[in-house]
Amino acid sequence: DGGITQSPKYLFRKEGQNVTLSCEQNLNHDAMYWYRQDPGQGLRLIYYSQIVNDFQKGDIAEGYSVSREKKESFPLTVTSAQKNPTAFYLCASSIAFGLEYEQYFGPGTRLTVT
Amino acid sequence: AQSVTQPDIHITVSEGASLELRCNYSYGATPYLFWYVQSPGQGLQLLLKYFSGDTLVQGIKGFEAEFKRSQSSFNLRKPSVHWSDAAEYFCAVNRGGTYKYIFGTGTRLKVLA
């Protein structure tokens, strides 16, 4: 079955540590996205990638970094510079980068930093 | 600035009752409009989308939505709700010329047996 996998589902880290969230898709999609979801705030875009070896900052990129070395993979690193990293993180992909293409979402990773 | 408003944070309906979830957007031209559903602890699933043409759009799971330009609205409806419809629903807008999807803050639906 094609889809998006995110691992792990739950992640716990101590403050000051960097942590990397995995996102893999086997949909052969060109575009991939990372969103952060907080209660009552909807989804906010962190980074997006239109194609391999290219990525752009979204609305809340500070304290985060990404890479896109393979078409299937778009890992997100939450660095110690992110002031409030505890949140639910969603990865998404679309067949191409464009207005009309729907986004397919992974199941999410809940990160808790203490 | 462009925005999406879902005025109802929580809605409770009885199973079998009809449902309408409200979505209003602020944007000069006709945007691309979407409704997504999210079950607890899960990702989002697309219910339906509107780009142009017929303003009444049919989606999956028996949902439909109507685009009303005069009211800047894209309300989601279902004639008879099932207990499995309990979830959070997000309206989203993708404005012309950019990559950016703007999501509303969501409406959490509770279904009473």
Image (cartoon, helix red, strand yellow):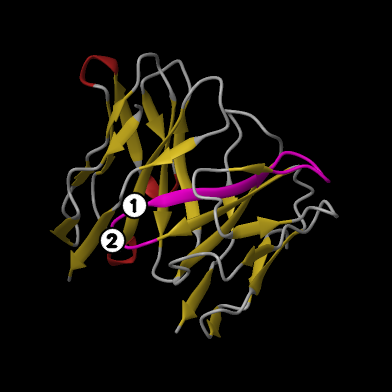
Q: Chain of mark 1?
A: B
x, y percent for residue B62: 37, 46
Q: Nearer the viewer, residue B60 or A15?
A: A15
Residue labelled with disc 2: B82
Q: Magenta residues: mostly which secondary structure?
A: loop
Q: Earlier in the sequence, mark 1 or mark 2?
A: 2
Segment tinted magenta in the rendering: A38-55
Q: Is residue B27 magenta?
A: no
Say whether residue B87 is left or right of residue B95. left
Q: Is residue A40 magenta?
A: yes
Q: Which mark is residue B89?
A: 1
Q: Nearer the viewer, residue A59 or B34?
A: A59
Q: Which mark is residue A81?
A: none
x, y percent for residue A14: 53, 85
Q: Is residue B63 above or below residue A97?
A: below
Amino acid type, mark 1: Tyr
